[in-house]
Image: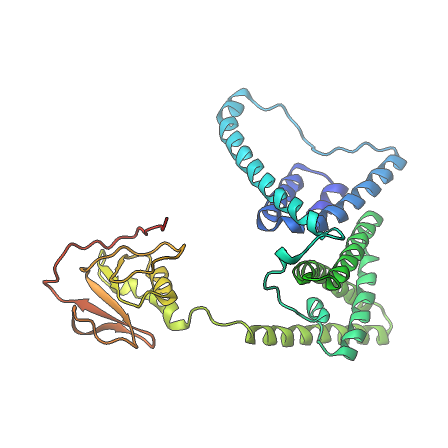
Amino acid sequence: MLMLGFQLLRRPSRATAGLFALFFGLGVLAYPLMLPFPALALGVAAVLEMKRRGALGRAQVWLRGRSRPRLSRVLLLGPPAAVIALICLFLLVAGLAKGVLAARVILPGGSLHAWAGDSPDWPFAHYFGLPAVPGLAAVAFCLLVLGAVVGLRQLDRPERIGLSVMCAGAFVMGVSFLGRVSGEYFAFKTFAFLGPVVLALAVVGAFVWGREREPPRRRAAVVALAGLCAFAAIGLRDGLELVPIQTPPETIALKDWTAQLPAGESIRIDVPPNTVQLWAAYMLHERRLSASRPVLNTTYPHLPVSRRADYVLVDRTQRRPADAAGAPVLDNAGFRLYRMRSGVPGPDRSSRRRVQPQ
């Protein structure tokens, strides 16, 4: 959004406007509370760019190559475009409504208790890819800001001031949230958006500094970039160690089982009604599935109930099903798949459809 927005202000064209609108729409739908960041940077840059063009006496042309559309094209594409525009407008209004609700509580005096959530209580240095060692983090952060300033100096005046205002405002806002009760959620979001921008500017600044002919500057830039890479690798490793594995490799391997079975054959999943059953059904979604005991009383769509199927799946902690015939057809470290014996009563209600709870 920032890159295309600055490009649109500097050299407007239909292609740039379309791409900017695409990323703006994605941003609104993904997280509307992010919009103040690009809005502030682009707004300041737009004002300065308009003043610059006014001083040069040049008119702003926002869309080049405009031509009158044909009536046949309007009649053909008009109705679908209107429907898409209405849907996008509805989603935009819904996203902005959430932003208005958040704006009411982030003002001084508003309670942040309802927005506390379970946001991580990360150290300040973590948001900028720096080690959480107090002394080292302080020095590294100062060097990072210095590199970001050098990176900002490579931009034209409107972009440079726009990004500077955005970064300064976000920094002040994030620090203010750290001092408020239940402000960790908004502090987390603010620094999570600010950190990558500052880090990108610092990398550009280190590269520019390294282009200087003086060997000391070049060596300092190489050391700085190497340090950022090392800090990023260490931080990524430490972060991944805290992330639990939602589904192990043997569950993901079930995706390959569907191709090893005859076409059209169904599977009854006898895994106990828990998240493992849900994951197994996700991985086997190309087959008609059912369950003897589906996952109920949740908001997740569950499998239809059926006694009969062509195969039956269990996890390795379970005994061999009574309806199974012979040895497992397929197995791995987590699951066993048996051929169901003939003569099992009842119809096969297995389906690729799911049952949505009320």
Q: Nearer the viewer, residue 38 or 159?
A: 38
Q: Nearer the viewer, residue 293 or 222?
A: 293
The quarter holding residue 193 reads bottom right
**Image vertical order of residue 342 relative to residue 235, above or below:** above
Left or right of 325? Residue 46 is right
Instruction: Give the percent coordinates (x, y) of residue 130.
Output: 71, 72
Residue at image point 79% right, 79% down: 135
Residue 100 in percent (x, y) is at 66, 44
Q: Mark yes or no: residue 258 visible.
A: yes
Seen at 57% across and 47% down, the residue is 29
256 left or right of 120? left
Q: Is 105 drawn above or below residue 268 in the view shown?
A: above
Total numbered labels = 0
Residue, far right: 55
| Residue 123 place in picture, x, y as percent | 70, 71
The part of the image, by quadrant, that contains residue 313 is bottom left
On the image, the x and y values in percent for residue 4 come to 69, 47
The residue sitting at 9% across, 62% down in the picture is 343
Q: Give the residue drawn at x 30%, y 56%.
A: 303
- Return the residue found at the far top: 71
Please identify the residue farthest to the left as the structure is shown: 343
